[in-house]
Amino acid sequence: MADCTESKINIRGCEVLMRRGGNGETALFLHGASGVAGWIPAFQALSDTYDLMVPDHPTYGRSDEPEWLDSMDDLAMFYLDLMDELDLDGVHLIGNSLGGWLAMEIAIRSCTRIKSLTLVGAAGIRIKGKPIADIFMMDPDDLVREIFVDQTFADNILGMELTEEQTDIQIRNRVATARLGWQPRLFNPNLRKWLHRITVPTHVIWGDSDKIVDPVYAAEFGNVIAGSEVTMIEQAGHLPHVEKAGPFVDAVNGFIQTKAA
């Protein structure tokens, strides 16, 4: 079992908190709107196979808030810089929710350093009549409950007594998500027309009971991204990597070993 290290890395003047553990090919996990809860069991399991990197995005968590960051376009370009600066090649890029949207924004710009793409409950496009849940207008406690099928996870989160730093991080993450996805709500109207530029094996993973991004989006991504495959995780909501860590890791490893080895 690989240990996780935390360090600050400087990418073009922006210091980013990076969690890293394991050995093997590089996997880069891009978090969603709520940030990173720590080195969760899914990360621990993935680090048994990969050199796993889990950063806080700029403006999120304990990373810097650069003046130049105005949009998802900027964030995508930042991660292309990060991969260049760290000289990462053959990256297995994994993104959940807003992080899945971000992963696609990166991939349509350049797949040069990417070996595979995994989208987990990804935002980024819109299906008419099936808008993504308006997380900005939801009561925070209700939102936590909507994210999970197994309410034990929600109970644990809502029952935590947060430190002042954790409260500040929650607020930072909400503000950052509003900055990037307020209008239009958590999608880019121009993204769909460029998805043909994704040229690496792509795996779409979804919780079959996702109440934030309807599972119909899984099939849509499967249709519009050439050669992609879809895996539904049973009895899982919007965070299958949290709620169903075992099946999630098995799905990730199985796809990469057969399609992106």
Image (cartoon, helix red, strand yellow):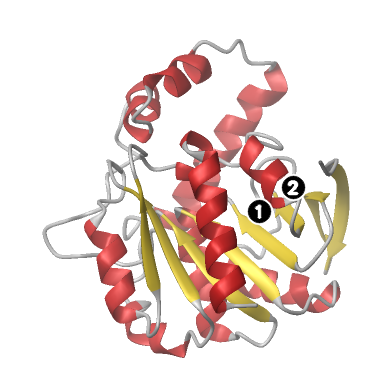
Q: Can you tell which mark lies on residue 63?
A: 2
Q: Residue at (54%, 47%) from the top-left corner?
A: 176
Q: Distance between the residues labelled 2 and 1?
A: 7 Å
- The crowd level at tag 1 (other Cα within 10 Å; few <14, some 14-19, many 20+) is many
Q: Position of 151 compared to 180: left or right? A: left
Q: Residue at (57%, 31%) from the top-left corner?
A: 170
| Residue 142 visible in image | yes
Instruction: Check disc 2 and report its element: helix, strand or loop.
Output: loop
User: Residue 166: where, in percent of width, then height?
Assistant: 66, 25
Residue 147: which quarter of the image? top left
User: Residue 178: where, in percent of width, then height?
Assistant: 45, 48
* Circle 2: residue type: Ser
| Residue 36 visible in image | no
User: Residue 38: where, in percent of width, then height?
Assistant: 69, 35
CB within 8 Å, label 2 to label 1: yes
* Circle 1: residue type: His
Against 133, is 77 above or below? Answer: below
Residue on which disc 1 sits: 57
Residue 76: which quarter of the image? bottom right
Which tag, 2 or 1, sits closer to the chain's start?
Answer: 1
Against 235, is 13 above or below? Answer: below
Q: Position of 8 compared to 130: left or right? A: right
Instruction: Check disc 1 and report its element: helix, strand or loop.
Output: loop
Against 228, is 32 above or below? Answer: above
Q: Which residue lies furthest to the left in this view?
A: 129
Q: Which of 171 and 25 is in front in this view?
A: 25
Q: Residue at (65%, 36%) from the top-left corner?
A: 41
